[in-house]
Image (tube, helix red, strand yellow):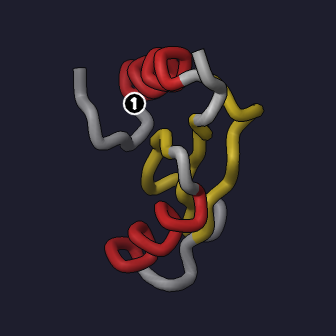
């Protein structure tokens, strides 16, 4: 399985406004800036990983109350 997925937090200042995964950090930052404002910035979390491992991490983040696109 390929390690091609990044885990990230999108932050405005010190506040995390979105937690997610992507295979293209620059594209996601541009998309989020359209939603949350131009001052936001992506902070990569950990190392590049497999999609399955990243999805598991994202579910765990949602369970901890972090803002994500998926609520499970």
What residue is rendered at 69% in x and 47% in y?
A: 44
What residue is rendered at 43% in x and 81% in y?
A: 37
Task: Name the image quarter holding the N terminus.
Answer: top right
Front position in the image: 64 or 58: 58
Front position in the image: 37 or 7: 7
Figure disc tally: 1
Seen in the picture, residue 60 relative to 58 is either above or below; the reply is: above
Front position in the image: 40 or 15: 40
Q: Read off the residue under disc 1.
A: 65
Q: Residue furthest toward the bottom? A: 38
Say left or right for 4 vs 64: right
x, y percentage for residue 68? 36, 40
Q: Residues within 10 Å of mark 1 (few under 14, many from 20)?
A: few
Seen in the picture, residue 56 relative to 22 is either above or below; the reply is: above
Residue 14 placement: quadrant: bottom right
Residue 26 placement: quadrant: bottom right
x, y percentage for residue 32? 42, 67
Say left or right for 22 vs 44: left
What residue is rendered at 59% in x and 57% in y?
A: 25
**Residue 24 visible to the viewer:** yes
What residue is rendered at 44% in x and 23% in y?
A: 55
Task: Name the image quarter holding the C terminus.
Answer: top left
């Amino acid at each position: 399985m390929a390690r091609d997925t990044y885990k990230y937090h999108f932050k405005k200042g010190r506040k995390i406004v979105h937690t997610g995964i992507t295979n293209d950090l620059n594209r996601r930052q541009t998309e989020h800036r359209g939603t949350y404002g131009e001052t936001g910035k992506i902070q990569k979390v950990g190392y590049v990983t497999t999609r399955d491992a990243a999805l598991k991490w994202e579910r765990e983040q949602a369970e901890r109350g972090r803002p994500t696109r998926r609520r499970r």
